[in-house]
Amino acid sequence: MNDHEEYDPILMFFITFFFGVFGVHHFIRRHYGLGVLYFFTFGVMGIGWLIDTIRAFVAMFKTNSEPQTGGHRCRQCGRRIEPNRDSSLCRHCEEQMEQDYLQISKHFTRIIDEVEKGQPHLEDYLRRFDILNKDVEQMWDLAQDIDVEPPFHQSDLRKAMDRKFAEAVSTRISMALEKSQITMDTLKLKQELMALTEELIDCKYHFPKYAELIAPMIEKTKETLNKI
């Protein structure tokens, strides 16, 4: 590792020039063994100090001559990027982001499968919707960095989730109606529809950001109840 890349080269030159004979520049870089050696030998009889001072002087001018643009250092970790690399990320950060993206994609796919299978309680849908929205936000952030296209735009995902929730409510109403037609038990039908209405009201209370989605579903169950 080039130590000059880790610290301000101008500052390191002056520290080396004025205090290097005591090994201060080595202590700053956590090269404690060299620091102790320089301290007790006065910079290895001045020879080590002179060599380090020349190196610091050259590094100072070498760094200052480089174009100071954001593309030279990784915007994620600050490491220097290879000159021929056409990216604002170093290879390490890009690989890490690709791995993170893959993990989130797998999690996203698993949750989508769970939603498609259907949930016994409507709140379970909404909880999973929250997870999916969070996954998509993370995927979009990473996608912009590693230049890939996420499987869903957030707006498309929201439309799909709203449709799935509406289908779940409609299915519950349809099943209750079909059951009542077979058993001829109107009282049981009313109880089931009232329970569904209460469940929707709870959902609206616990998930206020889905209020616009839930409100028409509540009206739908109440309307069905009034027709019985």
Image (tube, grey):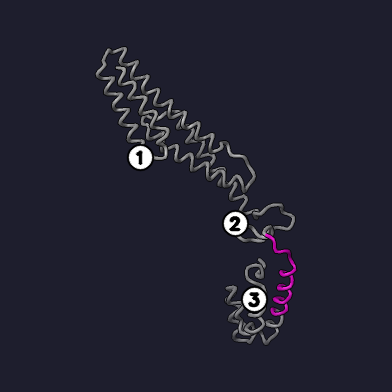
Q: Which mark is residue 12?
A: 3
Q: Which mark is residue 206?
A: 1
Q: Position of residue 31 (x, y in %)?
A: 59, 74
Q: Who comes first in sequence, dot 3 or dot 1?
A: 3
Q: Looking at the picture, does residue 23 appear above or below residue 137?
A: below
Q: Quadrant of residue 55?
A: bottom right
Q: Nearer the viewer, residue 40 or 227?
A: 227
> Looking at the picture, which amino acid does disc 1 mark?
His
Q: Looking at the picture, does residue 156 appear above or below residue 101?
A: above
The local crowd at label 2, few if under 14, some if 14 to 19, many if 20 or more residues have their Cα within 10 Å, is few
| Chain part drawn in magenta | 52-69
Q: Who comes first in sequence, dot 1 or dot 2?
A: 2
The local crowd at label 3, few if under 14, some if 14 to 19, many if 20 or more residues have their Cα within 10 Å, is many
Quadrant placement of the C terminus: top left
> Looking at the picture, which amino acid does disc 2 mark?
Gln
Q: Mark 1 and mark 3 in contact (Cβ < 8 Å)?
A: no
Q: Nearer the viewer, residue 167 or 225?
A: 225
Mark 2 and mark 3: Cα distance apart in space: 24 Å
Assess whether residue 58 is covered by the magenta stretch.
yes
Assess whether residue 132 is covered by the magenta stretch.
no
> Looking at the picture, which amino acid does disc 3 mark?
Met
Q: Secondary structure at mark 3?
A: helix
Residue at which label 2 appears: 76
Q: Position of residue 147 (x, y in %)?
A: 64, 44
Residue at 73% x, 65% y: name it: 66
Mark 3 and mark 1: Cα distance apart in space: 57 Å
Majority secondary structure of magenta residues? helix
Q: Secondary structure at mark 1?
A: helix
Q: Left or right: 14 with respect to 186?
A: right
Q: Looking at the picture, does residue 101 appear above or below residue 62?
A: above
The local crowd at label 1, few if under 14, some if 14 to 19, many if 20 or more residues have their Cα within 10 Å, is some
Q: Quadrant of residue 191?
A: top left
